[in-house]
Amino acid sequence: METEVRFSINKKNKKSVQKWLSQHKQIFQNSETVYFDTSKNALRDAGVELRLRRNGKGIKQTIKSVGPNGSLFTRTESEIQLSDFEPKLSHLKKFLTREKLCRIDFARLRPAFRTKVNRTIINNPTKNGMVQSVFDVGEIKADAETQEIMEVEHELKQGSTDTLLETCHEFLDRVPCSIGLEGKAARGYRLVTGEYPEPVFASKISISPDLPLPKAMREILQTSFQHAMTNLPVYLLTGHPESVHQFRVGLRRLRAALSAFAPILHLQNSGGLILQMKSIFNDFGSLRDADVFLDETLAALKNSTIPSSYYLILQEQVQQFRDQRFQEARDTLESTDFARFIIDMNSWIDSEEWLAQRRPIDQLMFERPIGVFAESRIQKMNQKLLKAGRRAEVGDLEDWHRLRIMTKKVRYASEPLLGIIGGKKGPSFAKSLSKLQDTLGKLNDLNSIETFLAQVSLNVERTDRQAFNEAAAFCVGWGAASASTAVDNLQPSWRKFKMHMRKTWS
């Protein structure tokens, strides 16, 4: 296993890195690494990386898993020394299942891309272990395509992960940088294929109902956090609207999981991480609102009687607003503060410090299987949902808005628990919840138009503001009329869901 944190360095901060490294004895190497795969990238598709590295110490073959193993910064890794620069296939095959072995033509393995770097290495001992820090400056090369490399990797060699966290904090205090969630292999494959990463959707969490509660909780929290983080490179490289949405969905799932497990959690020692996560989530809200308006609201408006001049100015100004928010969000994600948040949040999740340990009953809960907890917790969340629904049935739009929020919370908090319960009722209930959320969400999108366009208006040039405000007024009126139709659909949608819920859980 390898536990390693990577930071991307801007050229202007190179001297800061060198100064930080100079506190320890430095080892300098010229390193060349070749990554092997078939012409169709069969190894990458099988979830492994094969590389051979040549430096002053000889030749080393390394096999790594493509994605994280449990913690965000931990991957499965195995290394062996070689006598020549030819892959040792017996070492590689140990990493592959029988099914994957049958899909790979090992005779077709060939160099796919290579890296050449000037490497500075220090070994940083602490009271509780040792971290090796490596500063790489060089390039990735695939045929005629190249990409520069300037990054620092901190790898835990001995001791607990607290040792790695301590080193990362010391580094971040001295060197401005951004978190590097893409390894050299991912960047190399992009040079080879020309393909940019696609938005990553939530993976299904498979947890045994017999798994002890703390272990199950940690796995759910880790998976939710990783879902958000794997969308960061997609967002930074492509700006894809869905990557923004999936980043927020990942954070929302994490927050919902904390809510679902609230009775046995102690969140006061999070060091402000929960509030920071909420702030980051909210900062991306206006960007997501702009994407919804451009992709969905404008498409619906096109079928109305909107004058073309109104349509065009709304499209132009909201796109400009979106571009501005995109850059602001990009600056946040590439900041040192955000890098610190990621390593701190990941460490906090892994540490299990969120578990309540004050009462004797807390210790009993640690031994309780997740399956027993899951069903009782879902029942309690459903009761809250029914209560919110009863209020909405006789209430106003604000009550339907509260029901929408509760539906979203229950959906994201219950999804991993429903999978644990097993049987057919879990997937069926999840699908029903999703449909209800979509119906309530459409009404919310319509009701949010006025607030959103008022926010956009603040960024419109004075010469265009009157024309924009006229177009916005038309859009708000259209939204209000459409909302009244949407409200008519709420009662039957809620009644249908309520019947399904009672049938499922009776």
Image (cartoon, helix red, strand yellow):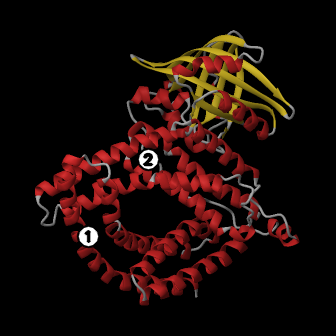
Q: Is residue 138 above or below residue 294?
A: above
The 10 Å Cα crowd at callout 2, few under 14, some 14 to 19, many 20 or more, is many
Query: Quarter-wise, where is residue 339 in the image?
Result: top right
Give the residue type at disc 2. Pro
Residue at image mark 2 = 199
Query: Quarter-wise, where is residue 409 in the image?
Result: bottom right
Residue at image mark 1 = 479
x 62%, y 63%: residue: 257
Q: On the rendered structure, is 99 left or right of 496? A: right
Point out residue 281 in the picture as x, y percentages from the top left corner.
51, 54
Q: Secondary structure at mark 2?
A: loop
Residue 399: tell me if it is visible. Answer: yes
x 75%, y 56%: residue: 269
Give the residue type at disc 1. Gly
Q: Is residue 274 above or below residue 119?
A: below
Q: Secondary structure at mark 1?
A: helix
Which residue is nearer to you in this view: 68 or 312? 312
Residue 203: tell me if it is visible. Answer: no
x 39%, y 43%: residue: 326
Q: On the rendered structure, is 419 left or right of 304? A: right
Q: On the rendered structure, is 359 left or right of 321? A: right
x 65%, y 34%: residue: 5
